[in-house]
Image (cartoon, grey):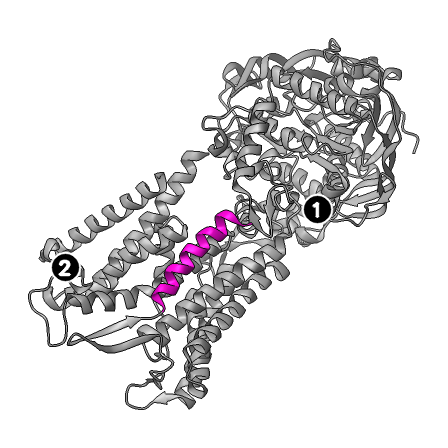
Amino acid sequence: MRKFFLSCFAIVISLLFGALILWLMGKDPVAAYMNLLQGSGLMHKVKYAGRQSMFTDFMSFIDAMTPMIFASLSVAVALRGGFFNIGVAGQMMAAGFAAHMLAGVIPSRVLVVVAGLIAGAVVGALIGWLRYKFNVNEVVSSIMLNSILMYLITFYINTFYVNPVSRQSKPITDAARLTLSGFRWEGLKVDIALAFPVAIITALFLNWFLERTTYGYEIKATGLSPNAAYYAGMNVNRTALMTMTLSGALAGLAGVSYFCGYLASIQPGTTPAMGFDAIAVSLLGGNNPLGCVLASFLITIISKGSVYMSSRQNIEPEIASLITAFILTFAACSAILDRRRRK
Amino acid sequence: MPEVIVEMRHITKRFPGIVANDDVSLEIRKGEIFAVLGENGAGKSTLVSMLFGMYEPDEGEIFIRGRKERINSPRYATSLSIGMVHQHFRLVSNYTIAENIILGLEPTKKFLGMFPCVDIKKANRDIAELSERYGLKVNPEDVIENVNVATRQRVEILKMLYREAEILIFDEPTAVLTPQEIDSFLHILKNLQAHGKTIILITHKLREIKAVADRCAIMNRGKLISILDVPTTSTDEMARLMVGREVSFTTEKSPAHFGDVVLSVDNISVKSVTGYEAVRGVTFEIHAGEVFAVAGVSGNGQNELADSIAGLLKTSHGTITLNGHDITRASVRERIQAGVAYIPEDRHNVGLVLDFPLRDNFPLRRYYSPKFSRRGIINEAEFDGYGRTLEERYDIRSSQGGATITRSMSGGNQQKAIIAREVDMQTPLIIFMQPTRGLDAGAVMNIHRQIVAERDRGAAVLLISLDLDEIIDCADTIAVIYNGSINKIAPAESLTVDDIGLYMMGVGRTA
């Protein structure tokens, strides 16, 4: 309950800061924030293009939110187990890349998901293994892996798998894509995120897993106090490895729902910003799986709605990232404040 | 009458919950070696820390060379030419000896006549000369992490001398040294004294005081008991005064009925986390229905002994047998299952997950057992119910029952929770490591009763404590540990407090 209050506080303060900046730029903050909601399909726009409505906007919003849920769950699970997984972006790329390669041979949605899951889990496990075997701080190894994976994948795509027109990787076939793009329904063109129900179920499952299973109990105990976990007879190393494998697998799901769902191809030379935004989302959600879903909803409003906002108000879309950054800062501060008060 | 260089008048220092120094007055003369003797927690370190400006006294005055001073920082203390060697050395481990010594007072030269830079050659020369003059052999160009503890200590001393300190404070300087190194250290002290330095030596080792000190202040529970002339006082007398107190048998205890041997420890050696051999060839047996208490001064291997029996540290040598089964190589969990309950010393970082709700801390060492979970799924009702049962049975108080975050509870109730958890496992062996540290008198009594109750149930009890009262109060058999070895094992009634005190200091040790 306290955590919920602190998260709300972080959001309100951040929105006020954002409003201040918009106001200093001579824009109307209220209108801009309303544009965010309109762009996310949560408020009516003044007019819609053909085959579009508030419903299609909302479905695109859900499509954008799905990978964010997975990514924030990945961060949350790691944090509960005492790891700061800042490598979600790299794990997402690895998963997306593996899925693309496989789907190029066998176009199957199930295979895409499995490939992503495994690729992410392998990268996550590597980070966990490096920590317990060689005591490599996971922040360092995961940031470095972000670069390593990104450049390897960039190299491969640019050399063997590039679409010469878009300068991105060759798009995934519709049969393997996790989003039904431009689905005709009642005269509208709707994007349907097939992975969205999976994301919700995963969040519910993780909540249960962390609170009601001995594995969750081990992850939490190890995360909060490795010494006490060792004293309790837990296998601290195995638990750490399990935590990072799970976190990586979740990042893998984020990767496939992003690169093989929300998007259809991989942009070489850049890591997805979502991997970092997910940290803000997880902190905002109190590192609780259900909190992550709520926080993903909020943050996606800002990121998804920013396109419409920038076109309507003639504002740079980076303002949205700025507000997200504020939220991360305040959410991190409030997490620390909360801990200090309890001591 | 030699000149008085340090005078402390009516010094009182309080910390939350305790009075560390209670109206202490003393004078230290120029050029003497003045020892401060006392048990752990007697307030020795606090007293001299105030001379070095680490704390300020709540009441009382300090005079240095006859002038009243308010020493509010180590920097100011240094300017009064007071130096201190802390128990834990404060050296930069990847710097050379010379770099460490000059740190903060670097001799500079102008490179190309304009750019100031550290004149390391001059530093090396100065330090070589300094170490020559005081007989403190070091090579200024060695890197700290490559030299041994005794050398590091010499570096700390040189650091003080480089800052031209006249009053040298040593906090437990020999705790980390081997016997041979101690001898050479005592020689250094004498040498420093010969150069006119005043030395304040904090220790609880009588032999060292006898060997070098001129006078000795004895402290007990924050109070100054007396100041003695060392040459005219016997070690026995000092030990009696140091431990000296009314020994009170407060816990009702029926005669012990020993059963079979439960725990047998055979010639074990254990390396501490830092790789130092903390336990050396320890052998003992504990019977069912016996409280086997290990007395000793802090840091003589007690932690490592307890951890190795509980399985948290590996033994490098020897065997541990529980009820006839060799558990030397068993994991922590296997030992819990075999029946080793353990109340660790560090209740915050080891004994509890402080950010768990209280109810989640009770099954901490048994959560996987059928009572608490089935096929990996936690039995929530049992977690709740078990928590309530223990809270009631052991009178554990918290603001919101099982949902209370453990961190927010009082130390006494946290300890009660750990003891409840371990005692309730009804194991054949239970280890109490410093079970009453920092608790108030009522809680202490209560825990002592539980220790005796465990014995009467037929458990073998291993009690390791720094508190002699506690040992006398509960023990059937007393072992004294000194420098990682058991110095003496005897039935409790055959030893007096003075005897134990002497064995704790390593007196009467032939080897």
Residue B275, image x, y percentages: 74, 48
Looking at the image, residue A298 lies above or below residue B138: below
User: Position of B176 compared to A66: left or right?
Assistant: right
- From this viewpoint, is residue A148 visible? no
Quarter of the image for residue A250 reads bottom left
Q: Is residue B44 left or right of residue B189?
A: left
Quadrant where the N terminus of chain A is found in the figure: top left
In this rendered view, identify the residue nearer to me: B234 or B300.
B300
* Callout 2 amino acid: Met
Query: Hey, what amino acid is under mark 1?
Result: Arg
Q: Residues within 10 Å of mark 1 (few under 14, many from 20)?
A: many
* A197 shown above or below B234: below
Q: Name the residue that disc number 2 marks.
A: A43
Q: State which region is magenta.
A: A195-213
Subunit that carries the residue with mark 2: A
* Magenta part, dominant SS: helix
Q: Residue at x 70, y 19 (%)?
A: B448
Give yes or no for residue A212 being in the magenta stretch.
yes
Q: CA distance from mark 1 to mark 2?
A: 57 Å
Q: Mark 1 — residue?
A: B333
> How many numbered marks, from 0 up?
2
- Dividing the picture into quadrants, the one containing residue B455 is top right
How busy is the neighbourhood of tag 2: few (under 14 within 10 Å), some, or many (20 plus)? Answer: some
Q: Are marks 1 and 2 in contact (CB under 8 Å)?
A: no
Labels 1 and 2 in the same subunit: no
What residue is at 76 percent from the left and 22 percent from the top?
Answer: B213
Q: Position of residue A32 (x, y in %)?
A: 13, 58
In the picture as drawn, the residue positioned furthest to the right comes out as B510
Residue B202's disc is: none
- Specify whether residue B467 is in view: yes
Q: Residue B60, image x and y in percent?
A: 52, 13
Secondary structure of residue under mark 2: loop
